Image: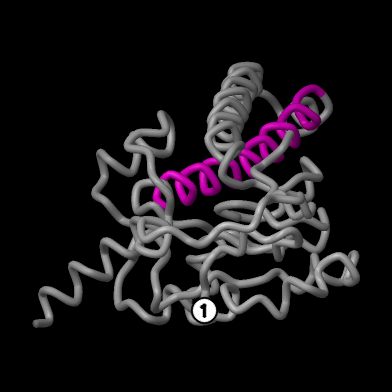
């Protein structure tokens, strides 16, 4: 499933001047980055884009050879070979990235997995009989007890993953941002999380897509609020 791949294919477009609204929507303090990993794939197609004065100012280039720009919160996945919007992590078990489009499904998958594991754990526990001699119990229930221990371990891991992702969703952050906040430019510039809109709005946006809006716009609004409070 597409986790939210960023379209990096060059598409011819008429040359137009950037509008004032477009310039206002892009935070001037944080210019959009070009994904250099995507440039390596076909460097000839992007040669003219690197010299664009708009890109040097951090504004979107609408020329005939647009640079593969990374939106805010996007990251290039080396395993998938794509830039993923709101990159969370690359799941080796699903062999796919978890990003903006499939993160809610991933959380639902973890919840369903935990329910199934707990159901199997209950079945294994109900089949155990402890009031037997040790030798007889080991022959009759040893394999079932080993299954119970294995399911307990899997349930603990699934519950820990689900709890950690629910915490990240409630604070509107990602696994990548939580682990590597000191390496991410748009997080180093702020003391707190610039995308946190409160518990209710974070959950509504994550599961229902409301309220809508780009991360660049939200980052700019938080930056303006922080500047006004400082003044």
Residue under the point 76% across and 51% down: 12
User: Does the rendering let one see residue 131?
Assistant: no
Whether residue 213 is visible here, answered yes or no, is yes
Left or right: 180 with respect to 214? right
Q: What x and y, as percent, mark residue 50?
A: 72, 77
Mark 1 surroundings within 10 Å by alpha-carbon count, few (fewer than 14), some (14 through 19), many (20 or more): few
Q: In the picture provided, is 143 more to the left or to the right than 153?
A: right
Taking the spot 55% from the left edge, 25% from the top edge, the residue there is: 115
Q: How is the image coloured?
A: one colour
| Residue at the spot of label 1 | 57
Q: Position of residue 79 (x, y in %)?
A: 83, 58
Horizontal arrangement in the rendering, residue 108 relative to residue 220 (left or right): right
Q: Is residue 27 magenta?
A: no
Give above or below for 72 relative to 141: below
Residue visible at 76% across and 45% down in the picture: 96
Residue 196 relative to residue 135: left or right: left
If the image is split into quadrants, where does the N terminus sit? top right
Region rendered in magenta: 140-168
- Choose between 47 and 19: the one closer to the eye: 19
Say if 59 sits above or below 213 in the image: below
Q: Is residue 137 above or below residue 199?
A: above
Report x, y in % for residue 126: 59, 17
């Amino acid at each position: 499933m597409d986790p939210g791949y960023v379209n990096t294919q060059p598409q011819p477009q008429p040359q137009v001047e950037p509008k004032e609204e477009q310039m206002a929507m892009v935070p001037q303090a944080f210019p959009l980055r070009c994904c250099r990993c995507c440039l390596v794939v076909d460097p000839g197609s992007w040669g003219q884009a690197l010299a664009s004065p708009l890109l040097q100012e951090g504004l979107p280039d609408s020329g005939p050879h647009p640079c593969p720009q990374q939106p805010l919160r996007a990251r290039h996945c080396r395993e998938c070979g794509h830039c993923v919007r709101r990159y969370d992590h690359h799941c080796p078990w699903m062999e796919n990235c978890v990003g903006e489009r499939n993160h809610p499904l991933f959380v639902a998958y973890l919840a369903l997995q935990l329910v199934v594991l707990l159901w199997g754990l209950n079945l294994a526990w109900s089949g155990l009989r402890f009031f037997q001699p040790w030798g007889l119990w080991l022959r009759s229930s040893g394999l079932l007890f080993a299954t119970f221990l294995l399911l307990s371990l899997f349930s603990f891991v699934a519950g820990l993953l689900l709890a950690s992702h629910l915490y990240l969703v409630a604070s509107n952050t990602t696994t990548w941002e939580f682990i590597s906040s000191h390496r991410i430019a748009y997080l180093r510039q702020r003391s707190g999380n610039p995308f946190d809109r409160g518990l209710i709005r974070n959950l509504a946006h994550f599961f229902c897509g409301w309220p809508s809006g780009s991360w660049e716009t939200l980052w700019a609004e938080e930056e303006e609020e922080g500047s006004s409070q400082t003044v």
